[in-house]
Amino acid sequence: MKIIDMHCDTIMSHYYNREENLYDREGHLNLKMMKKADALAQFFAIYLMRPEIDENGPYSLFEEMYQLYLKQMEQNADVIRPAYCCEDILRNQAEGKMSSVLTIEDGVFVEDHIERIQEVYDKGVRLITLLWNFENSLGYPSSDNVKEHNLGLKPMGIEAVEMMNRLGMIIDVSHMSEGGFYDVAQHSKVPFVASHSCARALCGHRRNLTDQQLRTLGSKGGMVGVNFAPFFLKDDSEYAEISQVIEHMQYMVSKAGIESVGLGSDFDGIDDAGEIKNYEGYIRILEHMQTVFTDDEIDKICTQNAMRVMKDVFGK
């Protein structure tokens, strides 16, 4: 089965550690591992780390990391190529290449310049995670405080949703408040995703989705990518187990539907991937999936659900 993983923080790690090449770098994910595990496409996030945002602002940090990303795509053009739609992914596959879909984690870069969404789209960004763990000009993050968790999108957040719909960009609600989630569900005319989240019923972390959120996501044609962080998989856990990942997949399928569950590892954004270890762990995950899902269901979770959402949003 081909793999489409909807979220990793490898570009951030690569930037922070000043690594030389994405092909064989140390960490959870590199291109060599992706080839071995039969990857089709990887969503690479430019994660705008708050401690790294200096006086030049978040958009400047985006530009720095974007240039690094472009350099890596050029260096490794023999194995991976950027993709801006489903047709690109299929074309790259036909030519024996993996695909990279560029994303941004944290809409903080927008500030009070809504036109920046158009600018990053023109640079190839095809998904924006609207919030991270801090309030920004678009809305509010998830919170253990019930009142704060119910806060919705700000006016600019609603404008961002409408603009992203027009442009053909995927809206990602991972990290977002529950109130913001439902505002996106109300205002978005196309499917949206929680690229790296798990089920709240199985693990009570504020970042995880309630049953109602999962049902809403499914009814809107969206999808959730299961996150491999141990503290999203099991309360008070410091070690991720493959059985826990499978359990969250099964549970989210039962609430959102088989068409609305996918993969969102959060590789290089989590401290320890436990027994999954790194991207090659997908080989073992697939082996375990075969004990509880049919081949058709595995194909949907690993590949086709993400392809469908991309086609619904991008238009091709």
Image (tube, rainbow, N blue to C red):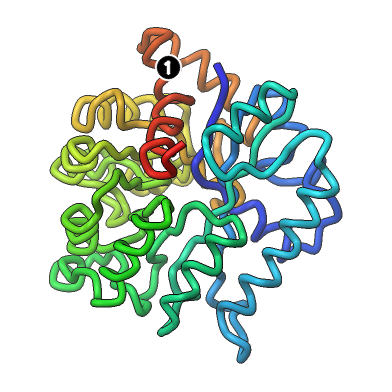
> Which residue occupies 74% across, 24% down?
95
Q: Answer with the quarter of the image where residue 61 lies.
A: bottom right
Q: Is residue 69 left or right of residue 315?
A: right
Q: Answer with the quarter of the image where residue 308 lies.
A: top left
> Which residue occupies 28% across, 46% down?
190
> Which residue occupies 52% across, 13% down?
287
Tally of numbered tags: 1
**Residue 171 screen position, x and y as percent:** 37, 54
Q: Nearer the viewer, residue 211 or 302?
A: 302
Q: Which residue is mark 1?
A: 298
- The N terminus appears in which quarter of the rendering? top right
Q: Is residue 305 left or right of residue 255?
A: right
**Residue 118 screen position, x and y as percent:** 49, 67
**Residue 198 screen position, x and y as percent:** 33, 42
> Which residue occupies 24% across, 45% down?
200
Q: Answer with the quarter of the image where residue 20 lies.
A: bottom right
Q: Is residue 142 above or below residue 305?
A: below
Q: Residues within 10 Å of mark 1 (few under 14, many from 20)?
A: some
Q: Is residue 187 above or below residue 8?
A: below
Q: Nearer the viewer, residue 306 or 25?
A: 306
Q: Is residue 3 above or below residue 309?
A: above
Type of the residue with mark 1 = Ile
